[in-house]
Image (cartoon, rainbow, N blue to C red):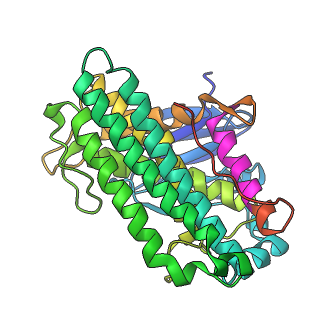
Amino acid sequence: MPIIQHLIVDEFGAFIGKHSERIIVTKGEQKLTQAPLVHLESILIASSGVSLSADAIRECTQRGIPIFFVSGSGSPYAALYSAGLTGTIATRRAQLRAYDTTLGLDMALAMGSGKLQNQANLLKYIAKYRKETQPTLYEELRRTALEIEDQLVELAQYRTLPEFREGSLTVEAVRDQLLGIEGRAAERYWSAVTQILPEKYAFPGRLRRGAADPVNSALNYGYGILYGQIERALVLAGLDPYAGFLHADRPGKPSMTLDFIEEFRAVVVDRTIFGMANRGIPFAQDEDNRLSKDFRRQLAEAILNRLESSVEYENKRHLLRNVIQIQARHLAACLRGERPAYQPFTLAW
């Protein structure tokens, strides 16, 4: 029996049940796959018409195995965890209090800085393989990376303001300015991306809702898969996925998840998808310009495999998935006052 760590269920009409120490996926009389519970770390349901047994849900929640639900476009719409994971009151109280203090702003600056630095580092990483073969593009990518790092300097300047030092400056007071800085960096980043992807993918620049081109569709789907992993890390660290800092509060909006995911987008999803494109892998779509079922599965497996790759972190090698969890715990510790400052994760290029 193969070892399955991340079970993907994307077959309409599939049924997820439990037998002995295994999760069994069937469709009618046909057994599609089975995954030993001892190795299983998550279940991703990526199709409509999938049903689950109460036994399977209970076993997964008792073992800390999250069940994530995403739409065909990659939009996450539900997740199942143990109810006991929401009972970390001290951390959540500290998280809510931080919003109205300079600590909340400091968190927003740190996570925003992590996002920008990882975007710059990814461009440098891609550039170094083009130094000899495409020297003009090499110089352009390096220049863009430096321009993104200029925006890092702008973010850092907020920590030098008298109001910040006095503890009276909050993220709400400067949110629009911070989003403007990130927006300028994003404009440069995605403009550079259009130059590194093969022309056959016809990448028009970054589009979110309603994207019809294959690369944007793949990015949206990949971010949806990463979203589940990010939310899980926050919940396990005792944090509230809906009480963020930079992203404004709205009913049903997981602001903390949207804040925390930023420093991992380029590291996990962008690097995976750009690599697939530059290897010439077809991003198959159907007649409605949606990613094909087979490619969605291929992409989901690639993202999950990326999370299982090891990176340098805190002077050791760690799986990326574990880095996300450790960072979430560091974030919680900073909010509780047990660590001096939150340092975002940045991947060396």
Residue located at (38% from left, 29% from top): 126
Q: Is residue 64 above or below residue 293?
A: below
* Residue located farthest toward the right when viewing the structure as drawn: 338
The image position of residue 253, as x and y in percent, is 50, 75
* Residue located farthest toward the top when viewing the structure as drawn: 132
Residue located at (68% from left, 54% from top): 55
The image position of residue 108, as x and y in percent, is 59, 67
The image position of residue 222, as x and y in percent, is 41, 46
Q: Nearer the viewer, residue 241 or 348?
A: 348
Dominant secondary structure of the magenta stretch?
helix
| Quarter of the figure with residue 323 | top right
The image position of residue 4, as x and y in percent, is 60, 30
Left-right relation of 132 to 305 = left
Quarter placement of the N terminus: top right
Residue 315 seen in the figure: yes
Residue located at (58% from left, 50% from top): 229
Q: Nearer the viewer, residue 84 or 116?
A: 116
Q: Nearer the viewer, residue 53 or 195?
A: 195
Residue 52 seen in the figure: no
Q: Is residue 64 above or below residue 346?
A: below
Q: Which residues are magenta?
A: 318-331
